Amino acid sequence: MSEDKAVLIKTAYSYYQKGDWDRAIEEYHKLADLDPRDLNVHNMLADIYAKKGDAKEALQQYDLVAQGFDQKNQVDKVLQVYKRMLKLVPNDPDLLNAVKNLIDKYLTRAAQMEEQDVEKAGEIYRSVLKAEPNRMDANLRYARLLMKKGQKFEAVETLMTLASNLDPETQTGRLAEVLQSVTELDPLNIEAREKLVELFIKARQIPSAIKSLQDLIEIFISKNELGKAEEAAQKTIDLGDQNTFYHLGVIYFNQQKYSEGRSAFEKFLKQQDSHVGALKYLALTFLRLNQTADAVQIYMKILDVYFQENLLDEAREVRQTILELDPQNEPVKGYALDPHLVSLEVEGAPTAAMGPTAEEIARMEVEQQQAFLVQAQAFTEKGFYEQAIDIYLDMLKRWPDLPDIRIRLQQVYALVARSMEPAEKYPSPEEIKTELEKELREQMRRELDEQARVSQERQRELEVKRELDQMQLKQELESKLLEQVQKSKEGEIRLQLAREYEEKQRQLAMERELLDRDKNDSFNRLKAELEETKISLEQRIREQVEREMKEKLEKETQLRAALQQEEEQRRREDDERRQYDSQKRDQEAARAKINQEIHQGMERLRLEKEKESKTPHMVQKVPEPLRIDSIETPAPPSVQSSPEVLEDPFIRQTLADIYSKQGLYLEALKIYERILNEEPHNEDVREKLRDILRLKGI
């Protein structure tokens, strides 16, 4: 059976080489009857039918081949077959829909396999992208899969390759989406952000362009690439963002372009005249320009801002700076910060009998610098960026040649440059206590008013009752008087009535005294209750303040942990980026070495071929054609030079494989070399080249 099959293969291939399509079809059908599962035979039949012009039969054979590869889960070969079918009927709606459904099916299958078999899912994504390299959903899913595997930079490279293949004129939306995905995966990717800026400007989305430029400025400043940061800032200002003058002033200051920095800060302060960071930079700029009087005026503005915001510690430091620059400055003494300290600063503290030595002064300076650095770092970790900036700026003023201060200042500035809005301020414990005491006094006043109202109502009720009793008593006395007049003498009656009246008056006085005593008791009781309420409220205030301070401490701890984690993540990403770049360079070097070895081997084969052709009476033995192992089909020697054949990648590689199996290595090498020139990353062809060279002992 195997001998019959070999004979049929030789016969069918010879007819194929001659271009005798009918006889070739007849022989290949015999082979298909012998082995219906041989996909190479059906592929040859499909190609012959296509050359003959019978598209219907060709599509049927291609469909059998595609089904066979689908059963073997060879996704890339299935898609190659369908692309071959689309060349026969380019606009067939059913076929186009079938290809779309097929790709959707493979993508769904890959998504389902991501949890169970990540490698297999990645293989499916790569196969789809090999057939459809610009398929956006496949690229995004493959990038997410690489991120899940921890291959961040491979994911970024995949998306950047997709972005380079998209047309910015006709695919603007898709390109912007891909670039934004890149910035989410790699926030420090400068290339993606620059392309986003160009897209936003071209689409006239100015706010988005400004936001992207501000992100670029932060990245450039954090990397100390001040020239690029300046270009980005100028472009942002050209787009109409006046707040970027602050960034530009900081950049100029670090470039020691003090005149330009002064102009930038002054333009920014026209928009936000109480921005402490800009004021401090402007004051330092004046000092660098030896304009001390102007610097003192700016420090006075800073002092006023701190004083208005009740930041007394910061205000004292600024006041000290002003007095160092201008000891006779009178307006600064009008700020009631600390009278004792003011008197010490103005009058001067008593000096020691003997001053410190030069070594002690140097040691004290180093200790002071270290203390400032530790304090600034603590402020940075707690998120108090303005206070850290203040310390670094003061250190720059005192020790302009101290290393690393500018870099530390730029790092802190990069943290605060994201937003020009002041951070949300929590009320201080004193403010909370003042507010609660105010509420307590108001509540006590309301309760006292209510108690007084109740007392007045009770007093009115008693007075009404007393008047009623007096009227009733009077009526009773009058009736008794009438009775006594009738019974006894008028004098005795009057005397008795007077005694009764005095008794009633005495009883009323006793009742009034009792009422006053009740009133005093009620007032004292109310006062005691209010005192207890006050104590309770003060306790609640203390508990609330302690609770808020504890929460604030916890938030600061969490913020410090988050900052440390972010810094650790950034360092880890930098290490991974360097490792990835190193691996990429090693791979490129290895690929270049392999290419050089392949090139040298091909040259040796050509020289051997030339020697063989010059050897007299040398008869070359042509091996018999072998069966093919890939989905492409060979072209006969008569059409090898045909541009149509050599330009068709579907046929070209199969033709080279057949040449290789027949021993025609030089012809195979020529085709492989052309494939590698067009597809430098085709590892399959590269491996076949190396197999040929190893076979030849090279």
Image (tube, helix red, strand yellow):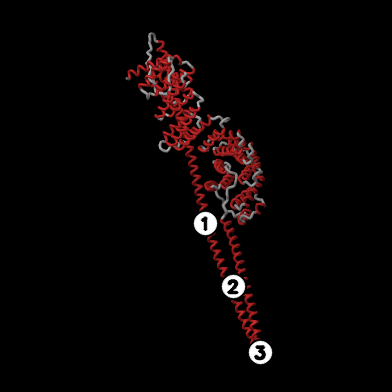
Left or right, residue 615 beside residue 412:
left
Please, what is the three-letter code of the amino acid marked with disc 2?
A: Asn
> Which residue position holds label 1?
546
Q: Residues within 10 Å of mark 1 (few under 14, many from 20)?
A: few
Q: CA distance from mark 3 to mark 2?
A: 48 Å
Callout 2 secondary element = helix
Who comes first in sequence, dot 3 or dot 1?
Answer: 3
Please, what is the three-letter code of the amino acid marked with disc 1?
A: Glu
Of marks 3 and 1, the one in the foreground: 3
Left or right, residue 46 beside residue 532:
left
Q: Which mark is residue 486?
A: 3
Of marks 3 and 2, the one in the foreground: 3
Q: Position of residue 505 (x, y in %)?
A: 63, 81
Taking 209 as reference, is 549 above or below it?
below
Q: Residues within 10 Å of mark 2 (few under 14, many from 20)?
A: few
Q: Position of residue 554 (x, y in %)?
A: 50, 51
Q: Position of residue 408 (x, y in %)?
A: 54, 42
Callout 3 secondary element = helix
In front of the other: 395 or 695: 695
Q: CA distance from mark 3 to mark 1?
A: 85 Å
